[in-house]
Image (spheres, helix red, strand yellow):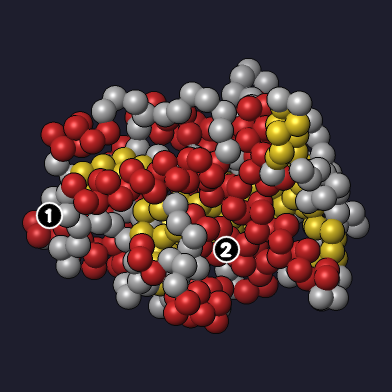
Amino acid sequence: MKLCVVMLAAFAVLPSASGLLVAVTHAAGRMGVSVVGQLCERWQSAALEGRADDKLRVRAIVRSKEEGARLNLDLCGAVLRGGMLTPLLDLQNDLGVELCVVPDDVDEHLGLTTAFENVDVAVLLSAAHADFAPADAKLQEIILGENDAATTIVPGTAFHVRASRAFSATKMASTTLGINVRVPYLQGAAAARRLGAEIAAATAAESSSIRHVVLRSTMGIPSLAASANAVESYKSRQAAATAVTSMGGAAAIAVGADAETALKKRCEQRGISYTVLRLGALVDSAGGVPLAFGCDDTLLLERVGDGMPEPPLIARNDAARLVVDVVSSGPAANLSGAVVDVAWGSKWGMASAGTEEAARTAARQDVVAGVVGVESFSVIGASIAC
């Protein structure tokens, strides 16, 4: 199924004659649904308020028809008619979303190459961690059991509820032991392979229309390097190792490091600008919480150093809001080559989501200025002054 419609938008990156085309990978994921939805809402609001001058198209890239069905259900809603779920809206005509299904098969490269054709901005989300686990291995086994993934097709909202309950239960059971991000091995390996294929396709010569790439990455990459650096003190290496563990472990972090290195190298070769957002641990909540920005794991190491029972957190909805703002600004806001850490501000936490104070503060926050205002951008392998 391939759907497409256009709507008006004000955009910093120069669009093509047919309008700006933004491709979002892993669009049916918990964060992907939020990114696609907020992109549509942003430009619909601009059109209604008479602030839009250009056209926008969103291309949602998914891996299967089942993922496409779930995305359609999440964005369009549904009603039960004649014993069958019938969408309330049309993905194409009402929301302006073009659905592109690219399965994990022998034709994946050709599928991804086609998916990125004529794209102006690519948002590479990949699959993130599934949930959290107690730092204590025995307690982890008791709480989580053996079942890592659901097998039925249900709305993403159901996954939100399930993941939020799992986080709350885990936190209550391990307030003194700590909480770590949990990345199931098989799902993580599959996501890593797919992300590598998406980076290659998005930055290939055939995708020369792409002007900017936004990559969702993870905190912990600088700490992974520091934990194995013999030049660092024993105390620094231990703190770095703890930080890596809290964000899912060395194997999961190494995947992010490899993805960043590949993206940087290929973008530089093709002359494509890029922005890397190293997010804290992703949680499912309403969001609307102010964000903090840093570089080289400063936010993560401060959290670990303070003996907090959990890594820095950020709601998927807040991360999606940041992605949309970055996409809207792009290279025009000096975001080209930026690699920045992002999480909820230290004042805020899970209880802050949905509160009036947090929402008002978040609404006033210029997150793009926060990214630009970081004292130094952590560029893969080095740091440069802003």
Query: Most extreme residue toward the left, as rendered?
Result: 234
The vertical placement of 149 against 182, above or below, is above
The vertical placement of 158 against 379, above or below, is above
Q: Is residue 74 visible?
A: yes
Q: Secondary structure at mark 2?
A: helix
| Kind of residue sitting beneath label 2 | Arg
Q: Nearer the viewer, residue 275 or 345?
A: 345
Residue found 32% across the figure and 61% down from its top: 312
Left-right relation of 196 to 343: right
State which quadrant residue 376 falls in: bottom left
First along the sequence among labels 2 and 1: 1
Q: Nearer the viewer, residue 85 or 62?
A: 85
Rendered location of residue 153, percent (x, y): 57, 28
Rendered location of residue 171, percent (x, y): 24, 51
Q: Circle 1 sits on which residue?
A: 176
Pointer 1 local density, CA inside 10 Å: few below 14, some 14–19, many at least 20: few
Query: Most extreme residue toward the right, as rendered?
Result: 17
Rendered location of residue 363, percent (x, y): 55, 77
Q: Circle 2 sits on which residue?
A: 321
| Kind of residue sitting beneath label 1 | Thr
Q: Is residue 112 visible?
A: no
